[in-house]
Image: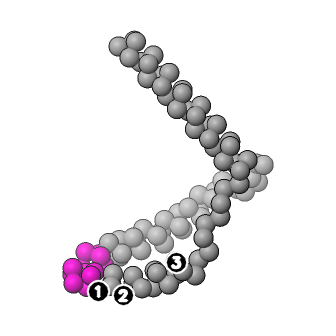
Amino acid sequence: MVSSADPETSEVSIVFWLLIHIPTLFLDIIAVLGVTNGAKNLEIIILRPQVSILQRKVKSPQRIPDPERIILATLTDNISHSIKDARNHLYQVC
C-alpha cells in the first residue's frame, strides 16, 4: 500500500528525529568516556542480578512451528547448494 503522506512531512520528521537523537548520542558517549573502570564494574555487579530476575520472569522463547521449520530447512538447503554451485563455478573460471 502506497503511503499518502506528504514527502515534506516525512523529511521534517526525520530532521526532528535527528535533532533529538544526535545530541543524546554525543552525551551518552561523553558519559561513557568519563566513567572509570571501577564504576563500570560496580554497575555490572548491580545490574547482573536484575538481568537474572528479568530472565526468570520472561517466558521461554516460542518454539518455531513445524511448517515454518520445514520451510526454513528447505531454504537453508537450497541456499547452501546455490553457494556451493557458485563457488565451484568461480573456481572453474579462475
Q: Which residues are magenta?
A: 30-41
Is 37 above or below relative to 77?
Answer: below
Asked whether, in this view, residue 20 is left or right of residue 40, the answer is: right
Quarter holding the C terminus is top left
User: Contact (CB < 8 A) between labels 1 and 2?
Assistant: yes
The secondary structure that most of the magenta stretch takes on is helix
Residue 54: percent from left, percent from top:
52, 81
Is 51 above or below relative to 5?
Answer: below
Sequence-wise first label, 3 or 2: 2
Residue lying at the far front in this picture: please name it.
66
Residue 55 bears which disc, if any?
3
> Which kind of residue does numbered mark 3 sit on?
Gln
Residue 3: percent from left, percent from top:
74, 52
Q: What's the residue at 29%, 86% (across, down)?
A: 42
> Which kind of residue does numbered mark 1 sit on?
Leu
Q: Nearer the viewer, residue 25 or 89?
A: 89
> Which kind of residue does numbered mark 2 sit on?
Ile
